[in-house]
Image: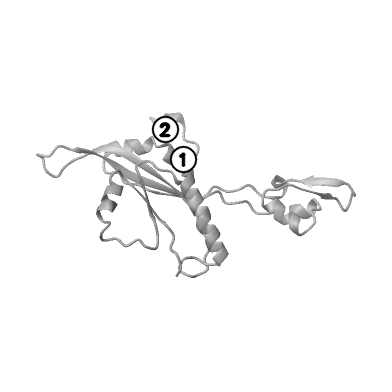
Amino acid sequence: SLSMPDLEIVGPTGTKTFLHSLRHFMRRDRFHVRTHEGKYASSLDKNATSQNTRRKAKRKKKGEDYDGGKKDEVNFDIESIPIEYDCESVSSHVAPRRTHAMSFVFSTAPIPGKFLVDKAKELNVPRGPMYAQLKSGKSVTFIDADTNTEKTVTTEQVVAASSPGIGVAVVYCPSLTVLNGLKLSDTLRSFQGGASTDDKK
């Protein structure tokens, strides 16, 4: 039987307890569930990176995904942004409780730059394996056919600059307190580019 990928859940404090309470109703024989609570960044999770690498290697060996279809691997990082705030009760007799509003940012890796074939030809780089090495970020050394001298060409000479990856934010903002917290979030500010210090006020 085909194995299914692991399920990773990122949520507020209490998510693990909630899932544990459902253990008698959930059948997870074919996959594992990993839960992360509060602040979490998959890019800093070595265990998650290791598991993703193993899953990709396994699928690559089989030449298929868990559904049996041949699909491109889609990789992205997820980072949670928990903002603490007082959640008002619907009853005036119950005091507000302290909890977290969870927002999330999904982002992909930078998009590699295009290989400039014309530039490679201009530099007399031999066609074939050296093109592939340059595309992968390696420098190549060869004998220039025109000058009969050794020449080294770097990736930067024949590959265009990479473009930023794609970022998507899923924001939950139930109060002004949470809004102000989101404004100060380093994770969200990293997508604002040239934000000045004054913008943080």
Task: Point out residue 107 in the picture as x, y percentages from the top left corner.
Answer: 47, 49
First in sequence: mark 1 vs mark 2: 1
| Residue type at the position of mark 1 | Gln
Corner quadrant of residue 14: top left
Corner quadrant of residue 87: top left
Q: Quadrant of the C terminus?
A: top left
Q: Nearer the viewer, residue 10 or 33?
A: 33
Mark 2: give few (<14), some (14-19) or many (20+) Cα within 10 Å: few
Q: Nearer the viewer, residue 3 or 126?
A: 3
Vertical placement of 200 versus 162: above or below? Answer: above
Query: In the image, 44: left or right of 14?
Result: right
How many labels, in total?
A: 2
Q: Quadrant of the N terminus?
A: bottom left
Q: Nearer the viewer, residue 132 or 189?
A: 132
Task: Point out residue 95 in the picture as x, y percentages from the top left corner.
Answer: 14, 37
Q: Residue furthest left?
A: 93
Q: Residue furthest right?
A: 148
Query: In the image, 86: left or right of 160?
Result: left
Question: Could you tell me which residue is drawn at 51 percent across and 50 percent down?
Answer: 50
Query: In the image, 193: left or right of 91?
Result: right
- Circles 1 and 2: CB atoms closer than 8 Å: yes
| Label number found at residue 192 | 1
Query: In the image, 33: left or right of 55?
Result: left
**Residue under label 2:** 199
Vertical placement of 43 versus 59: above or below? Answer: above
| Residue type at the position of mark 2 | Asp
Question: Could you tell me which residue is drawn at 52 percent across and 66 percent down?
Answer: 71
Task: Point out residue 173 in the picture as x, y percentages from the top left corner.
Answer: 30, 44
Mark 1: give few (<14), some (14-19) or many (20+) Cα within 10 Å: few
